[in-house]
Amino acid sequence: MMRCLATAACALLLAAPVFAQSADSPDMTIARAGSQASDKGPAAYFTGSARIDPLFPVRPPMDTSGAHVTFEPGARSAWHTHPAGQVLIVTAGAGRVQRWGGPVKEIRPGDVVWTPPGVKHWHGAAPTTAMTHIAIQDTVNGKNVEWMEKVSDEQYGKEKPMMTPALENYTQDLVLGELWQRPGLSPRDRSIVTLSVLVAKNQVLDLPFYLNRALDSGVKPGEIAELITHLAFYSGWANATAADSILHTVLVQRKIDPAQLAPAKPALLALDEKAEAARAQGVEQNFGQTAPGVVQYTTDALFRGLWLRPGLAPRDRSLVTVSALVANGQAAQVTYHLNRAMDNGLLESQAAEALTQLAFYAGWPNVFSAMPVFKDVFAKRKE
């Protein structure tokens, strides 16, 4: 069989025409990365900030051109059509696309969007996450796009502006703009801190927005489920069940398979028996006669169960706990858990920046009450 295939291949090679290339034939060209100037998306055709990096222009006999387009959070194109259609290849972030009369659809890295010729549509970033795509389209009679009216906030799906102008300004510019861009803590960690506050304080109104932001920032669905489970013990069962209901809605909207969530009874992480024995002994001596049930469940359910679940890294689980304690004004319990967080890999600089995030989401008084404890822990760990 292989011999037959080889013979057939040789026959095809012998039969194939030989193309001669003269010395004056056009050579290949390579447009090096960064060699072509970027353009800002014109305000007449874009809402928000968009950057256009050309990839290749029309070169006869080809009528096709391509560009790399990056939309900042909330940015989008105006409504438009393409005479020969368009292909979008999403390469980073999270975005939205809509054809006229149809629903707004979410697009993510790896998605390929084909818009047929003449179909009115728009595309852009998600409200909280930037999006980059490659756009490829043909030119017909010298044109590759027909621009139309801008996409309204209602069409885009953006929430209505706040009633209080100053609060809207602080929210957009200071909190979502400046705070979330600070380099001391990753967007993923900021999401963990923020979700911990919202769940701990049962602030469910803002949960959908920040759950989506967390997922866009790299927090896995299973990690969010574990965060909520963890906070059932540290902020109360009702707070966790309220958050669980909202998480369910968000995951359904994003078509996330529940199989991505951690099982109810996974194999637990290894226990540091020596450290746990010392902790348990201290609690038993202090409170064993006062509330033996609390002492029992603290050991069995929390430190020999919850804290060993693998769905959330020990460092992140500690960050969740510290954030919830600060948010609820429980500064007296911060010392043990902040030390545990730093033993689990949280850096001092990250802990300090977490306080900055907490100031906005848990309030300045709670953070100022916790700062002396953080200061003391930092100092003693350097001794």
Image (cartoon, rainbow, N blue to C red):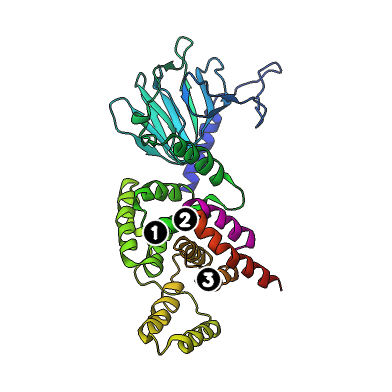
The residue lying toward the viewer, choosing from 114 and 291, is 291
Q: Are marks 3 and 1 in contact (CB under 8 Å)?
A: no
Q: Which mark is residue 362?
A: 2
Q: Which mark is residue 337?
A: 3
- Residue at disc 2, secondary structure: helix
User: Is tag 3's residue or tag 1's residue first in the polypeptide sequence?
Assistant: 1
Mark closer to the observer (3, 1): 1
How much space separates mark 2 and mark 1, taking CA atoms? 9 Å
Q: Are marks 2 and 1 in contact (CB under 8 Å)?
A: yes
How much space separates mark 2 and mark 3, taking CA atoms? 18 Å
Kindly identify the amino acid type of the residue bearing the numbered disc 1. Lys
The residue lying toward the viewer, choosing from 143 and 165, is 165
In the figure, is residue 250 to the left or right of 129?
Answer: left
Kindly identify the amino acid type of the residue bearing the numbered disc 3. His
User: Is tag 2's residue or tag 3's residue first in the polypeptide sequence?
Assistant: 3
Mark 2: few, some, or many residues within 10 Å (few <14, many ≥20)? many
Position in image of residue 277 (x %, y %): 51, 86
Per the image, the residue denoted by label 1 is 201
Q: Is residue 357 a member of the stretch shown in magenta?
A: yes
Q: Residue at x 34, y 51 (%)?
A: 251
User: Is tag 2's residue or tag 1's residue first in the polypeptide sequence?
Assistant: 1
Position in image of residue 300 (x %, y %): 40, 81
Where, by quadrant of the figure, is residue 98 drawn?
Answer: top left
Position in image of residue 326 (x %, y %): 49, 63
- Residue at disc 1, secondary structure: loop
Mark yes or no: residue 238 visible: yes
Q: Which residues are magenta?
A: 345-361
Seen in the picture, residue 33 relative to 357 is either above or below; the reply is above
Q: Is residue 10 a member of the stretch shown in magenta?
A: no
Task: Locate the C terminus and report the quarter of the image it occupies.
Answer: bottom right
Kindly identify the amino acid type of the residue bearing the numbered disc 2. Ala
